[in-house]
């Protein structure tokens, strides 16, 4: 038997069911809200138009209240007895009425150890104080909100009116923004500082004045009295002022102390140099002393110097140069040298006692002096053995007995420094005419009229001298313009050798060959 087919029923999700149920409820809520807004707008628009001026600020409203009193309560304004309302609070309201409200300003007053609170329409501190029966002395001072100002100066202007939170009674009064007004001026804090007579004894000077400051330090600052850190003030600077208070100032003495390279400018109540130095923590050790003396009474602007003393034993050395002695040695060849003893410098020592004051020597006393080391001469041996040798030249062999390396230059009569019309022009030291074959030498190295040979020049005669020809320097003579020449060459002294007692065995060591 076949059963008839039935449609399958599916269960819808819970979210779809909730949406279907909540849809009508949501639309009902929106409709009720729109209806309330329309009713509220209709109710407001049917109210009487009233202009309320609070402390000069106009506000245009509509209201269903019947009297001024009801309107004020609906505006959520708390009035004080000093507030001024026009017309009277019992007056009936009509369309187009103007309600003027002058809110008194709250004031707190602190004076003579007491506090007052009041509401006022006065504009100056002097008027407010007179209203509560407080009188002012000419030197009393007044601060308004912590700022000092004259008693007859106007109070700070009140802040503009501001809107408060939404109305306590929804249908009492409305403004374009739907909020109520709070226009009471902010509180003003007045403080009266009473001036009291004070007497100051400043060293030899005495003065009396009035001050409304709180402490001794503030009163002295007000009077332009400057103090130094070491000045003593009785009572202390932080002490409060009181009627007839006497203030004593004991001035410190300015002094300058010079110590250890520093200049210390200070002020003190100490009387003697010793006490001033001790106050600064400066110690005198050993032979240290002060100028002036420690018992000296300090005067204003006086200078104290601390002198540091140091005594030492010092040993000084005085050097004695040694001599150089030359000794001939016939076993050494000519122009050879040998140091036999290097020589020693002599030393003389002196022991002295020296006194220093602030690093400067003030006296010195010699206690002992002795020869610590004797000088010894430097001993150099020089060769005296002469050997004749032969040198091959392009003109044949020559014999020589000495070879000397020399700085070689060239000259002629024209470069000798004399003009052609000079009577000695071209005349050499030996009377010979200057020219090729005549050379200028230093006679201490090569004696005049000595026959020599110079490679690249030839044989010549030492027949001239020169102001700049010194030591191992030879100037070769030429007939015409000499060639440029500045070089070292070996110069050979030809035989025969001169007598031994005429030979200079130790030659000058200049110029030095590079």
Image (cartoon, rainbow, N blue to C red):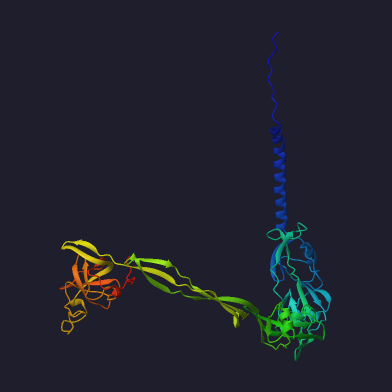
**Residue 394 falls left or right of residue 498:** left
Front one among 415 and 157: 415
Q: Residue at x 38, y 71 (%)?
A: 327
| Coordinates of residue 259 in the picture (x, y in percent) | 65, 79
Front one among 386 and 317: 386
> Eyeballing the image, is 466 above or below 6?
below
Front one among 419 and 41: 419
Q: Residue at x 71, y 81 (%)?
A: 277
| Coordinates of residue 485 in the picture (x, y in percent) | 23, 68
Res 266 visible? yes
Q: Residue at x 70, y 38 (%)?
A: 23
Q: Which quarter of the figure has residue 507?
A: bottom left
Q: Which quarter of the figure has residue 301?
A: bottom right
Quarter of the image where the N terminus is located: top right
| Coordinates of residue 383 in the picture (x, y in percent) | 34, 67
Front one among 406 and 269: 406
Q: Which quarter of the figure has residue 267?
A: bottom right
| Coordinates of residue 105 in the picture (x, y in percent) | 76, 72
Quarter of the image where the C terminus is located: bottom left
Res 224 visible? no
């Amino acid at each position: 038997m076949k059963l008839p087919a039935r449609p399958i029923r599916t269960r819808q999700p819970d979210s779809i069911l909730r949406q279907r149920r909540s849809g009508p409820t949501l639309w009902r809520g929106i409709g009720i809200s729109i209806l309330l807004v329309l009713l509220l707008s209709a109710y407001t628009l049917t109210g009487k138009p009233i202009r309320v001026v609070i402390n000069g600020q106009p506000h245009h409203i509509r209201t269903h209240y019947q009297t001024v009193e009801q309107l004020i309560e609906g505006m959520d304004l708390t009035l004080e007895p000093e507030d001024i309302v026009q017309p009277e609070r019992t007056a009936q309201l009509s369309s187009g009425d103007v309600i003027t409200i002058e809110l008194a300003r709250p004031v707190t007053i602190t004076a003579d150890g007491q506090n007052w609170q009041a509401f006022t329409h006065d504009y100056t501190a002097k008027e407010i104080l007179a209203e509560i029966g407080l009188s002012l002395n000419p030197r009393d001072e007044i601060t308004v909100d912590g700022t000092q100002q004259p008693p007859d100066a106007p109070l700070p202007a009140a802040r503009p009116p501001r809107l408060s939170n939404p109305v306590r009674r929804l249908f009492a009064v409305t403004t374009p923004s739907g909020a109520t007004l709070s226009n009471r001026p902010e509180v003003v804090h007045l403080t009266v500082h009473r001036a009291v007579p004070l007497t100051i004894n400043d060293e030899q000077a005495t003065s009396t004045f009035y001050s409304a400051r709180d402490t001794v330090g503030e009163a002295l600052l007000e009077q332009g009295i400057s103090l130094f850190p070491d000045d003593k003030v009785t009572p202390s600077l932080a002490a409060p002022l009181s009627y007839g208070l006497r203030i004593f100032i004991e001035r410190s003495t300015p002094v300058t102390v010079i110590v250890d390279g520093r200049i210390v400018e200070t002020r003190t109540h100490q009387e003697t140099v010793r006490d001033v130095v001790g106050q600064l923590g400066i110690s005198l050790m050993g032979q240290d002393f002060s100028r002036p003396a420690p018992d000296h009474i300090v005067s204003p602007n006086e200078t104290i110097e601390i002198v540091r003393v140091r005594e030492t034993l010092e040993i000084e050395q005085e050097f004695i140069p040694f001599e150089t002695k030359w000794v001939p040695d016939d076993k050494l060849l000519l122009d050879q040298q040998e140091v036999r003893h290097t020589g020693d410098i002599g030393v003389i020592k002196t022991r002295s006692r020296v006194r220093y004051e602030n690093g400067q020597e003030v006296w010195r006393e010699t206690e002992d002096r002795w020869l610590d080391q004797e000088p010894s001469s430097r001993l150099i041996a020089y060769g005296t053995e002469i050997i004749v040798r032969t040198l091959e030249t392009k003109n044949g062999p020559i014999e020589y007995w000495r070879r000397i390396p020399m700085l070689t230059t060239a000259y002629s009569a024209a470069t000798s420094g004399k003009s052609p019309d000079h009577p000695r022009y071209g005349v050499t030291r030996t009377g010979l005419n200057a020219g090729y074959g005549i050379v200028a030498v230093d006679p201490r190295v090569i004696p005049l009229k000595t026959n020599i040979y110079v490679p690249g020049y030839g044989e010549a005669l030492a027949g001239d001298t020169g102001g700049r020809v010194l030591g191992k320097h030879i100037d070769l003579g030429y007939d015409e313009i000499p060639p440029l020449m500045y070089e070292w060459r070996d110069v050979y002294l030809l035989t025969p050798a001169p007598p031994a007692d005429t030979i200079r065995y130790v030659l000058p060591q200049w110029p030095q060959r590079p």
